[in-house]
Image (spheres, rainbow, N blue to C red):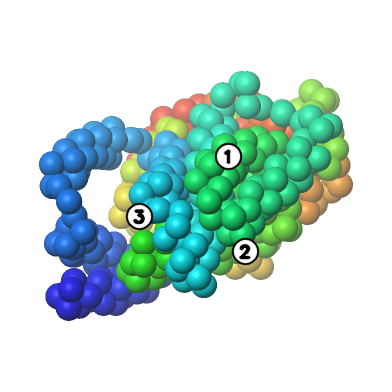
Amino acid sequence: MALIDLCYLISAVLFIIGLKGMTKPRTAVRGNWIGSLAMLLAIVATLLHRDVVTWTGILISIAIGSVIGTVMAKRVQMTTMPQMVALLNGLGGGGSFLVAGAYLAGKEHTTLVSAGNEGMDVLIATAASGLIGAVTLTGSLVAYGKLEEFKFLKDFDAPWQKLANLLLAVACIGLSALMVVEPAWAEVAYWVMVLLALGLGVLLVISIGGADMPVVIALLNSYSGLAASATGFVLNNTLLIIAGSLVGASGIILTRIMCTAMNRSIWAVLFGTLQAKGKSTTSDDIYANVKSTSPEEVAMMLEVAERVLIVPGYGMAVAQAQHAVRDLTNLLLAKGIEVEFGIHPVAGRMPGHMNVLLAEADIAYERLKEMDEVNASMDKVDVAIVLGANDVVNPLARTDPNSPIAGMPIIDVDRARTVINIKRSLSPGFAGIANPLFALDHSLMLYADGKKAIVDIVKALQEG
């Protein structure tokens, strides 16, 4: 046991060091490796525990999980990474409530009664693990479906939903209390509570709009950590408590950052009430004066520019245009033109989505600027290239109080001297609303696939 405890202590320290390393781009990869090493050490130490009855089932499970994980890691595209994160959050929550339930099923109820306060602590932790884990599982699956844009999950808004949320939450808390005061009924109450919590997870997330999914993913990540931490109390596993607490705390901090970036209330996220304030204008009249351009014309504008700002969005991820963007950046820098990237905190489908894509293309991290920094000097930008972004540059966030994105801080590219919007069409973004930016007098549309458009601009610059 002393060796196992020592391994757990080392793993906990490595988890903290790894998390610290991932706060900076230059140390992020090393931090990830340190975290992976910590998890490997924790697994090995757990397998050496004397309570392991048989290795057969464990080894089979490890083999199956390793194969599935390897295949998914190889096949997942950067565009679907947010869906992967949502799925992993859900599986973490599901694993937590199943482990807690299995522990409860393996305990004699008389043992829990005779254990006094210690038995009560275990029951409270078990109830917390079941409630949070079940909500995380179904909430994450709904988030996954919304990110995949399943039609049956869109625009769900039932008048009875808030009342149902309240009743389910009260019922879950009541059943949790029953587990504690009547241990003889603990197992039955637990699984009924889990079933109700699964329904609660669906209702909490299903009405939240797609534009708010980055916030929801961050919150569900926190939930999965809290569920794991509660399971650690159930199993009396110190390392699981520490690791779950780290995930839970970092997830809630990230959620707070995302809420600030989107002008959303964290309480609205917690209780599943992030909804549009009304209907925003989507009339085709907004696009009556849209002007198109060509790669050659864009190249001419870039030739005489002194400062260029590129604002990437989900469209860049879909087109896999990050490497072409790197080529354009290097070409402009070689001509003495300053190039920066304006990164909105919720650009893409999850926090840091654009940062990861651009880092993959070896674009210097120093060129990635936060929203507030680029907005402060937007008037000095000669050409702003909006590559596949929509909602995060939509002026309706400032002007239309009925818009689903009303009040959300945006990157103010409409203040740049010239705006080039690269999109395949005038289709709306994830929020489903029109964007007046496309029809401004100093705004031009380059209709094309993101990668092809950038490649054609690079070619025109080289030929010029």
Q: CA distance from mark 2 to mark 1?
A: 32 Å
Residue toward you, 307 or 25: 25
Residue toward you, 124 or 384: 124
Question: Seen in the image, is 87 located left or right of residue 392?
Answer: left
The label shown at residue 92 is none
**Closer to viewer: mark 2 or mark 1:** 1
Where residue 383 appears, as percent x and y from the top left, is: 58, 50
Q: Quadrant of residue 456?
A: top left
Residue toward you, 397 or 16: 16
The amino acid on which the numbered mark 1 sits, given as a three-letter code, is Val
Tell me the residue that label 3 is attached to: 359
Where residue 33 appears, as percent x and y from the top left, is: 23, 62
Q: CA distance from mark 3 to mark 1?
A: 46 Å
Tell me the residue that label 1 is attached to: 192
Residue 337 visible in the picture: no
In percent of the image, x 72 and y 58: which residue is there? 267
Do the residues under discs 2 and 1 have CB atoms within 8 angstroms?
Answer: no
Question: Seen in the image, is 394 located left or right of residue 188?
Answer: right
Q: Earlier in the sequence, mark 2 or mark 3?
A: 2
| Above-or-below relation of 29 to 354 | below
Q: Earlier in the sequence, mark 3 or mark 1?
A: 1
Tell me the residue that label 2 is attached to: 256
Residue toward you, 368 or 271: 271
